Amino acid sequence: MLLNLSVKDFVIVDRIELEFASGFTVLTGETGAGKSILIDALALVLGDRGEASVVRAGCERAEIAAQFDIAQLKPLQTWLAENDLANDDGECLLRRVVDSTGRSRAFINGHASTLQQLREAGEWLVDIHGQHAHQSLLRSAAQRALLDGYGGLTDAARQVAEAYRAWQELKHQREAGESNALALAQEREDMVWRVQDLDALQFTAEEWQALLAEHARLSNAASLIDGARYGVETLSENDASLIAQLSSLIVKLNQLREYDSGLKETIDLLEPAEIQLQEAAHSLNHYLLKLDLDPERLNDCEQRLNAIHSAARKYRVSPEQLPELLETAKARLAALIETADPEALARKEQEAQTQFDGLAKKLSASRKQAAKKLSQKVSATLQQLAMAGGVFEVGLSPVEEGASFGYENVELLVAAHPGTPPKPLAKVASGGELSRISLAIQVATIDVAAVPTLIFDEVDVGIGGGVAEIVGGLLKDLGAQHQVLCITHLPQVAAQGHQHWRVAKESKNGATLSRIETLDKKARIEEIARMLGGVEITAKTRAHAAEMLGVSGK
């Protein structure tokens, strides 16, 4: 869900810091106060196009930052990790900066990102319903996902997609084998030779490290022997060896200790040092016993290294990459051998197609049932939303050859008025109708909706009275399972909110600025009374407003 939004120098906003809560939040204000600015700011930080005109007059840049709780959005967490944009605290910070020249920069969790990445992240986070562009229900893939989610078919759709990819891969292999038989035969011959050549080398990454270490030791054996001998002599074998001198010092200090016990601390430090030096001398003697000049073994190591380097140069890779190159060659050879048997490949292709066909047909049958139920459910809700006679349909158009999503395209269709033919949701002209249709769909699919934050703009255009109260009730119901924000001019809708914000204009240093304030119970009564109308707000109007808030449980 959306946790907070920071807007700075955006249109007529100098600076706004908003903390969001769960449930249903309403946003009201007089016409022209800038209610849509909040939506526009959110749309910008979610990847909408930004222009220099969004920067407040006289400022260098506009900045918008939105922080989200994504602890429950595992797919988004995975996507962020795959794109090196992850944050470890279960939150996601989107930030957008547009300067006065129109140049735009985007950031996700502090990392520079592209606008496309901002849009992709936003698709998991927020749906803005209304006349604005950020509307997932207008995308074909989202419409299909909506139906599959509603029908509990998400796993079935994934299996169909996997089966389709497997079928297409085998089909591609067969077609490539038929059209490039000569070239593939030559590649197969070359790959056989490469596998045999690398196999004969019998080389592993582990051997490479061990071989380098052994070669370094053997080629420097004389220096190692001289150094070890020098160490032994310095420690213990010279008349003036370190051990002898330290031992003599300890004896001397022990003699003097009877005159001053304060020397005991120094002696206690020196005695362990003498033991350590004796152990070091023993270790070096043991090391010398194992060291030997072995020109024959050194020659073997150098020959082995030369063979490995020669193979690496031949295949233009580093020595460490030779084992991986062998595995890649073996895998490619196996694929080429399959290609060399067109009948076997055709059988596998047919088996994969049959697998896809069975899964896709089963998915189609389930989609038809889910489409019928969803169509009826949304159509029934539309009747309550000042769209009497409106019809909602989930259209399924066949795809004869099949695709990764199955044997049908899914398209949401709406007839907003009686007697008009259903047409694609994307072509519904009225922003208010589109918002109410979206609301009906969200209510019908409340249990499967994946996006946690829903924003409705102009959802109440052209309605009033009892219908407005129904709209408010539906939004409140949505707020029980999602975070819902609604811009409204109807008191019947505003009275149902769990939280209430008011947008107003003010003049400051000759500039017009927009501000947003959270309303307490008393202020809500005044705002609802203002929305109820009238030149003068009377006690009766306030009583009506208080009654509306009381009816909604406020």
Image: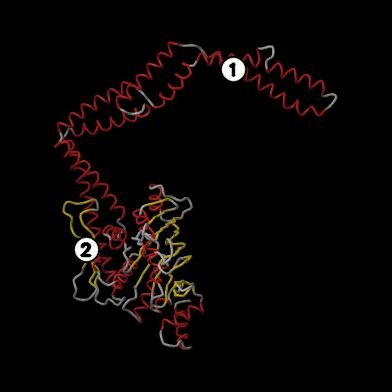
In the visual, does 523 lie left or right of 253?
Answer: left
In the visual, does 494 lie left or right of 369?
Answer: right
Residue 152 appears at what percent x and percent y? 31, 58
Q: Considering the image in quadrants, where does the N terminus appear? A: bottom left
The answer to whether the residue labelled 1 contacts the one labelled 2, judged by CB atoms less than 8 Å apart, is no
Residue at the extreme right = 259
Residue 249 appears at what percent x and percent y? 75, 20
Residue 72 appears at what percent x and percent y? 43, 56
Q: Quadrant of residue 387?
A: bottom left
Is 268 in front, or is 502? 502
- Counting every numbered tag in the picture gives 2
In three-dimensional space, the C-alpha distance between marks 1 and 2, rounded to whole angstroms, equals: 84 Å
Q: Amino acid at mark 2?
A: Gly
Of circles 1 and 2, which is in front?
1
* Residue where numbered disc 1 is placed: 284
Q: Is residue 445 above or below residue 280?
A: below
Residue 238 appears at what percent x and percent y? 66, 12
Is 450 in front, or is 121? 121
| Residue name at image x 47 percent, y 76 percent | 553
Q: Amino acid at mark 1?
A: Leu
| Residue name at image x 72 percent, y 27 percent | 269
In the visual, does 75 lie left or right of 546?
Answer: left
Mark 1, secondary structure of its residue: helix
In the visual, does 283 lie left or right of 240?
Answer: left
Residue 385: tell me if it is visible.
Answer: yes
* Residue where numbered disc 2 is placed: 395
Q: Is residue 272 above or below residue 148?
A: above
